[in-house]
Amino acid sequence: MRQSRLFTKIEKNPPKDEESLNALLLERGGFIHRLMSGVYSYLPLGLLVLKKIEQIIREEMNAVGGQEVLMPALHPLENYIKTGRENISDLFHTALGNGSKFVLGQSHEEVVVPLVQHYAHSYKDLPLAVYQIQTKFRNELRAKSGLFRGREFPMKDMYSFHLTEDDFEKYYDVVKKAYIKIFERAGIGGKTYFTYAAGGTFSKFSHEFQMLTPAGEDTIYTCEKCRIAVNDEIKDVHKNCPECGGALSGPKKAIEVGNIFPLKTKFSGAFGLTVKNEEGKEVPVFMGCYGIGLSRLMGAVAEVCNDQNGLIWPESVAPFSVHLVYLRSDDKNVRAEADKLYEKLTVEGTPVLYDDREDKSAGEKFAESDIIGIPVRAVVSEKTLKSASVELKGRGEKDFKLVKISEIKKYVK
Ligand code: ATP
Ligand code: MG
């Protein structure tokens, strides 16, 4: 993409009341734009990041047999009356002119259970897992943490359905491993802990994936040996590491980037979702649910992958692989060579953001390149072309190296 055509600009003055680091970095770089607290637009650069995160999640959910669907955001209130969740605090309520009452989906148990009930009748139909990547609405009291806490935000939610509790537990472990992969692939594996948490009303425990950050709203205690953590809310139950029995270290601030949850028969029971077992007897279906907030994950990556100059995207979620920066010159050949390199890389499948702007100084271009945070910067100038080269620099590195244009593919994807 040619930066001269990019309609967004580096934001010199992000909203004054924006407190969170992730939002400040992302708004400054032109990745997102705030409409109101907790509600953001994803701009060209930001949408590329979000789509890469989405694709990582999709691949890992497909790999564990999840079948992708897309369910509605508008739900009938009566389904929530059935599950007793019509008064939960983060539900947005709305109504038709004729008085019919609806809510905006903050999660999809009330939709997915009747959906699966329509198709699954026998033990032969189980196990099954369906997931979606879809917009959630939550009436969050406080939405001051940028992408960490949206009132409207994209979430991946998967629901699994099993004949027995044992089968559910096996699958729960499979999804746990898929989640570990997702956070590793997104570049926050080193900071993310599988965390024992309280189970709400459905079961004794659930599990969260918590990423360490001072901006987090949760408090955890970690066991470095087992790479797991315990949420503060259940610390009294687990005074030591639940896996090795060793001492825990903390308290540490963290943000929940994902959650896996045993639902048991709470929702299948509410809707009367049963299947015939091998003996022909109707039995309740065991369920699990598995969520990841895509925007929260994007915010989490931004929150930890940066320096004082701006973002430092991991390659796996970076909007582009290379930031090709042309330094203005009176010699028209410089521009022509830069254009040529941009076209060549693009044709060869390397995602390039090309700073082809004529009205910016080298200093301005470098500062903006650091703010955006693409993993590799390649500078083309009069000086570099003297040796038919570009200056390559990793965003997180100090020094650049001169690389022959003919060899650039050795250094970029
Ligand atoms: P929290 O305790 O932070 O409010 P939650 O327990 O309500 O989270 P879940 O209902 O389990 O979260 O939602 C699944 C995932 O969706 C979370 O792990 C998180 O990644 C994300 N998520 C939850 N609420 C928000 C929000 N308001 N904005 C962005 N992402 C969110
Ligand atoms: Mg919540």
Image: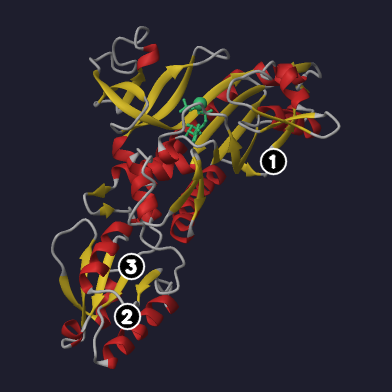
Which disc, if any, is residue 322?
Answer: 3
Looking at the picture, which amino acid does disc 1 mark? Met
Give SS at disc 2. Answer: loop
Q: Compared with residue 290, is residue 21 higher up or lower down, i.e. above or below?
A: below
How many residues crowd mark 2 within 10 Å: few (<14), some (14–19), many (20+)? few
Tell how many labels. Answer: 3
Drawn side of residue 209 relative to residue 265, left or right: left
Question: Residue 318 falls in which quadrant of the image?
Answer: bottom left
Residue 116 at x, y = what percent? 74, 32
Numbered disc in front, either 2 or 1: 2
Drawn side of residue 304 relative to residue 124, left or right: left
Numbered disc in front, either 2 or 3: 2
Residue sitting nearer the eye, 27 or 306: 27
Question: Residue 352 falls in which quadrant of the image?
Answer: bottom left
Whether label 1 lies within 8 Å of ligand 1 gets the answer: no
Looking at the picture, which amino acid does disc 3 mark? Val
Compare marks 1 and 3 and give the one earlier in the sequence: 1
Residue 312 at x, y = what percent? 29, 53
Whether label 2 lies within 8 Å of ligand 1 gets the answer: no
In the rendered view of the protein, which quadrant contains the C terminus? Answer: bottom left
Find the distance from the CA under tag 1 to the CA under tag 3: 36 Å
Q: Identify the residue under disc 1.
A: 71
x 46%, y 51%: residue: 33
